[in-house]
Amino acid sequence: MTSRRELLGLLAGLPLLSLSRPALAASRKRVITAPGGRRITVTVWNASGERQGYILFSHGFRSAPEFYPDWIAAWAGAGFEVHAPLHTDSLQHPLMDKPEGLPVWKTRVEDMRAVSRAIGADYVCAGHSFGGLMALVAGGVTAETPEGITGPLADPRARAVIALSPPGPLKGLVSKEAFSHLARPALVQTGTRDVLPGRDDPESWREHLTAFAEALPSGDRHALLLEGVDHYFGGLVCDPAKTGPDQHAQLALVSQVTLAFLARYAPGRDAENRAPLAAPRSPLLRLYHK
């Protein structure tokens, strides 16, 4: 099993945040419980108009749900009720800096299971960075089962996956081969500046597309590559301190492509009448299918 110290080492290259961006106004917060009574705060954005479905969103390492306002606003505006837990690794979580620490992988799995139960219906699982891995695991990617967790990590209620800049293989947690077990329609995104921390390799952004590369061809796996995009969209998501070149246009393209993906693959869509997954015409993106 991967220890907490080892897991934190694996995640050292993921965002270290200074959370200063104003919070996104949310419709409501609810508190649910994990096994053992741990309290999980879930931010819920109501669907605009008639509800079209549910999205469970997992934020990046040490981030928080409110640091993804553009995407969440687009999804809610399209009729999806968005549920986003505050994971224990968030800098906003009251237990994050406790000296005894918390098993991050285990508590994230518990969070996802608890929110799935609270939704109580089929949903689309989405996430950014480490949260993107949570979404992929819910969709079938096999990863280490945390100590104290029983049963498969995949969730039968997760009917489709949106993984935004997810990690590739993480030693002791998820192998390259594990991504071949992806069992749901999926959209995997990265950018040409989304290089791995500490890697002197301008092509290392390709590792974020491991889930797409390793998944078995089934006609419903999609990869979105955005020109000039880094891990944080220049501070527009996850960590507002990670400023960079203006990437508002690319951020809006992600919203448009994810909405097209939801229109085609969200639960309740008739497979016989699905609209084609088409990307907006733009020199800033490439969309691949397999």
Image (cartoon, rainbow, N blue to C red):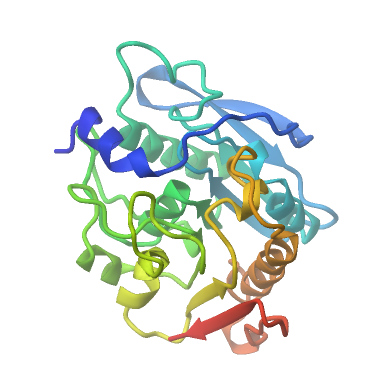
Residue 139 in the image, given as x and y percentages of width and height: 40, 61
Give the residue furthest to the top. Answer: 99
Image-based side of 8 in relation to 91, left or right: left
Vertical relation: 78 (above or below) 286: above
Q: Name the quadrant containing residue 95.
A: top left
Residue 256 in the image, given as x and y percentages of width and height: 72, 70
Residue at 46 percent of width and 51 percent of height: 129
Image-based side of 110 in relation to 23, left or right: left
Choose between 229 and 171: the one closer to the eye.
Answer: 229
Give the residue furthest to the front. Answer: 200
* Quadrant showing the C terminus: bottom left
Vertical relation: 245 (above or below) 187: above
**Residue 183 seen in this snapshot:** no
Residue at 65 percent of width and 66 percent of height: 254
Image-based side of 249 in relation to 2, left or right: right
Choose between 256 and 109: the one closer to the eye.
Answer: 256
Give the residue furthest to the left. Answer: 1
Residue at 58 percent of width and 29 percent of height: 18
Residue at 31 percent of width and 34 percent of height: 106
Q: Name the quadrant containing residue 105.
A: top left
**Residue 168 seen in this snapshot:** yes
Residue 249 in the image, given as x and y percentages of width and height: 74, 66
Choose between 45 and 210: the one closer to the eye.
Answer: 210
Residue 255 in the image, given as x and y percentages of width and height: 70, 64
Vertical relation: 260 (above or below) 235: below
Q: How many marks?
A: 0
